[in-house]
Image: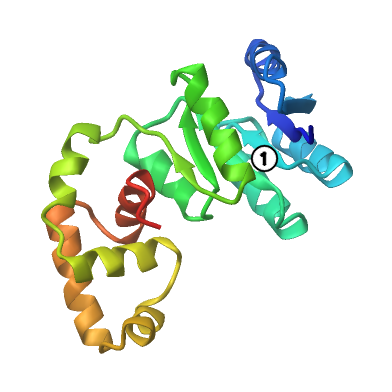
Amino acid sequence: MVKTKIIIVDDHAMIREGLKKLLDMEDDLYVIATVGSGQEGIDAAIKLRPDVILMDISMPGISGIDAAKTIRKELPQSRIIFLTIHDDRAYVNEALKMHPNGYVLKDADSTVLTDAIRTVSKGGKYTYSKVNECEDSEQLGELSARELQVLGLLAQGFSNKEISQKLLISEKTVKNHLYNIFKKLGVQGRTQAALYAIRNNLC
């Protein structure tokens, strides 16, 4: 069996040790290193070339987000999951700007984390958040088929011009769709809309 190689980057030793014990219990997962800072995460990733990196966001020195940006440039094939205590929009939005492969809260069930690792290792995306979970399914039903298409492309990082070309509509029409999408979802801007799309597997 080919195991998924994982690096854990977190400045709390107890969390690193706990996660390693948890993941080492899985037959298909293998923690190859645990480190305590963003810079150590960069160094370990470049040296060991993991399949998946579990990256804390808030760390002294180089933040998890900045470390992830560097790793993404050096190792685009490595998948990055932000593992954090933060579920408020400010942190989520900042993290999503670099399009991580996953976003999981530290208080999630262990099965959520293992599912996330397996999903991103196969090329998928995984975002777990308790923010507005109850509202999402209702809001989803308010979007038209075309609005769902636009939202999905937006979450994949396409610009308004690129969306218009893909859907064979004008940029003005794309802007109108985005205005309606933001209003229906109750979000402010592209980043929050992207989070919604990822959480609902629309991209």
Q: Residue at x 36, y 49 (%)?
A: 195
Residue linked to disc 1: 62
Q: Against 90, is 173 above or below?
A: below
**Badge 1: residue crowd in 10 Å (few <14, some 14–19, many ≥20):** some
Q: Can see residue 60?
A: yes
Q: Against 59, is 81 above or below?
A: below
Q: Residue at x 44, y 21 (%)?
A: 108
Q: Quadrant of residue 134?
A: top left
Q: Where in the figure is residue 86, as x and y percent of width and height?
A: 42, 29
Instruction: Please name the amino acid that badge 1 sits on.
Output: Ile
Q: Where in the figure is residue 125, as x and y percent of width and height?
A: 50, 47
Quadrant where the C terminus is found in the figure: bottom left
Position of 33 compared to 132: left or right? right
Q: Quadrant of residue 50?
A: top right
Position of 73 compared to 157: left or right? right
Position of 188 compared to 191: left or right? left
Q: Residue at x 29, y 69 (%)?
A: 150
Q: Residue at x 21, y 42 (%)?
A: 136
Q: Can see residue 57?
A: no
For numbered disc 1, what is the local secondary structure?
loop
